[in-house]
Image (tube, helix red, strand yellow):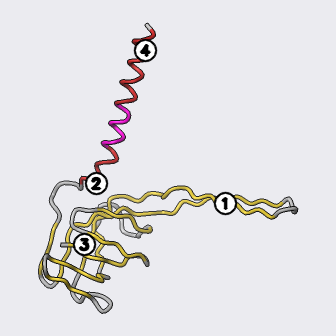
Amino acid sequence: MYAIIEVGGHQHRVEPGHWFEINRVVTKVGATHPVEQVLLAADGGEIHIGTPFVAGAKVVCEVLKHHLGPKVISYKFRRRENWRKTVGHRQPLSLLLVKEIIVGGKTATAKAAAPKAAKAPVAQAKGQAGKAAAASAAKKSHKE
């Protein structure tokens, strides 16, 4: 089962167990954040299309963390006037995990385990650190 939801002016395709980022929400970390703006919901062969939203449909999400997005630098320059301006910005974001999708009495829930996609960057970072440590150890043993 999947759904297309609208949150903060953006549309996201979500499934139970997947995570996505949105602009910062007021909900605390660990609490649930329901989204009732479901534009489309599909369950196998059955598709529910909203006008504009599907009646009675809801996506229940859990707030995993609040963080800042990547830094964006804005540089303004006026030629021949010795005028420059640099401004940086980091957008406050929230990471949400989709727990369940409820449509017309049917519920699709995520498995109890954390999503694989959320663990992948951490595992990859540990793998890179392990490779770097092994490479530096090999260099040290080579010098000796």
Q: Which residues are magenta?
A: 123-130
Q: Are marks 1 and 4 in contact (CB under 8 Å)?
A: no
Q: What residue do we see at 12% from left, 79% from top?
A: 106
What amino acid is labelled 3 in the image? Val
Q: Of marks 1 and 4, which one's residue comes earlier in the chain?
A: 1
- Which corner quadrant of the image does residue 42 belong to? bottom left
Point out the residue furthest to the right here: 80
Q: Of marks 3 and 4, which one's residue comes earlier in the chain?
A: 3
Mark 2 residue element: helix
Mark 1 residue element: strand
Q: Are marks 2 and 3 in contact (CB under 8 Å)?
A: no
Disc 3: which residue: 60
* Relative side of 99 to 80, left or right: left
- In whole angstroms, how far apart are the C-alphas of marks 1 and 3? 37 Å
What amino acid is labelled 2 in the image? Ala
- In whole angstroms, how far apart are the C-alphas of marks 2 and 3? 18 Å
* Relative side of 33 to 17, left or right: right
Q: Of marks 4 and 2, which one's residue comes earlier in the chain?
A: 2
Main secondary structure of the magenta stretch? helix
